[in-house]
Image (tube, rainbow, N blue to C red):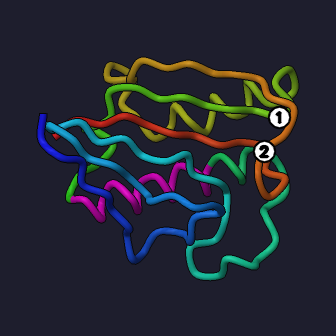
Amino acid sequence: MTAPIFHMIEKAPTPVGPFCHATEVDGGVFLTGQMPTDPKDAGAALSDGIEAQTRRVMDNLILVLEGMSLGLQNVASVRIFLTEFKRAFYPMNDVYTSYFPKEKLPSRTCIGVTALAVDALVEIDVIARR
């Protein structure tokens, strides 16, 4: 196993805690969970609603992937965390699936949680492969 490479992506949002945007080891790329924060203004208010927050999170994931010369086609697995699981699951899925070809949806886990950083409604992390 080679030593991990820790990536900070200039165009991606400022992390909300002490961690890098992604860690890469042996062709595997592990993206830190993205929040629905504005990459141009870390202090901006979050968008209202699960649909808008899911779009922002997916766009933030794309920024991190692109910063590593990757894209959603490289994503193998996804974990989604929702604070309002029963209410948010289906509308989040509508936005989420619009980012992937229907025949190439990655494996996925979706988890209901009591709270997320910055009072977000959704957080998504991914594992990708070069």
Residue drawn 56% across and 36% down? Answer: 96
Give the CA distance from mark 2 to mark 1: 7 Å
Q: Residue at x 81, y 24 (%)?
A: 85
Position of residue 32 in the picture relative to residue 114 (left or right): left
On the image, the x and y values in percent for residue 15 come to 57, 64
The image's mark for residue 116 is 2
Span colored in magenta: 55-68
Q: Which mark is residue 126?
A: none
Q: Nearer the viewer, residue 112 or 92?
A: 112
Left or right: residue 78 compared with residue 56: left
On the image, the x and y values in percent for residue 18 come to 57, 61
Q: Amino acid at mark 2?
A: Leu
Is residue 32 shown left or right of residue 111?
left
**SS state under label 1:** loop
On screen, residue 71 versus residue 60, left or right, reads left
Secondary structure character of the magenta stretch overall: helix
Q: Position of residue 31 (x, y in %)?
A: 42, 46
Q: Report the residue marked by disc 1.
A: 83
In magenta segment, residue 47: no
Q: Nearer the viewer, mark 2 or mark 1?
A: 2
Q: Are marks 2 and 1 in contact (CB under 8 Å)?
A: yes
Picture layout, residue 58 above or below residue 126? below
Residue at screen point 67% across, 77% down: 42
Q: Residue at x 69, y 22 (%)?
A: 111
User: In the image, what residue type sits under mark 1?
Assistant: Thr
- Label 2: element kind: loop
Image coordinates for residue 29, horizontal then vertical, percent = 29, 42
Residue 27: quadrant of the picture: top left
Which quarter of the image is occupied by the C terminus? top left
Q: Nearer the viewer, residue 30 or 91?
A: 30
Lower sequence index among marks 2 and 1: 1
